[in-house]
Amino acid sequence: MRAVLTRVRSASVEIGGEIHGEIPQGFLVLLGVHAEDTEKEAIKIADKICGLRIFEDADGKMNVNPVDAGAANLLIISQFTLFADCKSRRPGFSKAARPETAIPLYEKVIELCREKGFTVATGEFGAEMLVSSVNDGPLTIILDTKEL
């Protein structure tokens, strides 16, 4: 799995002209599922997302996790394009999981994050979405379960 995680002051997703999900301070997470991913990767990436210490402590150092920072909010958006193959000018997406594999794993990550006490808003798998965010920092991190 891959995730592009951005620390935000707020974020929202609009589908069909209406707000589908929104959060205050927390993380906007674009989540891609690889064709070979399993529940093992879902557990690994959920643990990393929820435990990242990227909020400042009293000394201004990134040393505080989202729960302790009062920012245990996630907006998780499925993003199959994170596994784009860009060797040619027209990207291919054969490395991305098919919906029958990706949807349950996407939903598993959401479930695991909620079990850790996070408020989780989502997009809608496969929908055309407009995602808005007010980036904080800006601070953006790329996570890949093959590297964790």
Image (cartoon, rainbow, N blue to C red):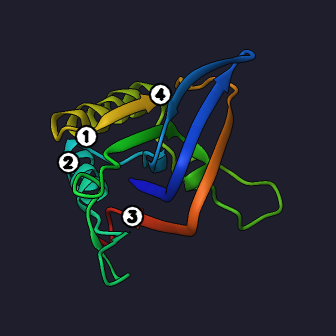
Q: Residue at x 51, y 58 (%)?
A: 6
Which residue lies under the disc numbered 2? 43
Crowd tier of the residue under label 4, counting other residues whose Cα lies within 10 Å: few below 14, some 14–19, many 20 or above: some
Which amino acid, mark 3? Answer: Asp
Front label number (3 vs 4): 3
Whichever of labels 1 and 3 marks the residue nearer the N terminus, that label is 1
The answer to which quarter of the image holds residue 20 is: top right
Which amino acid, mark 2? Answer: Ile
Q: Which of 2 and 95 is in front in this view?
A: 2
Cα distance between the residues tagged 2 and 4: 19 Å
Q: Is residue 43 left or right of residue 52?
A: left
Which residue lies under the disc numbered 4? 99
Which residue lies under the disc numbered 3? 144
Crowd tier of the residue under label 2, counting other residues whose Cα lies within 10 Å: few below 14, some 14–19, many 20 or above: some
Visible residue check, residue 57? yes
Which residue lies under the disc numbered 1? 113
Q: In this view, does 120 lie to the left or right of 127?
A: left
Cβ–Cβ under 8 Å for marks 2 and 4 = no
Front label number (2 vs 4): 2
Count of residue discs: 4
Front label number (1 vs 4): 1
Q: Which residue is drawn at 47% across and 68% down?
A: 141
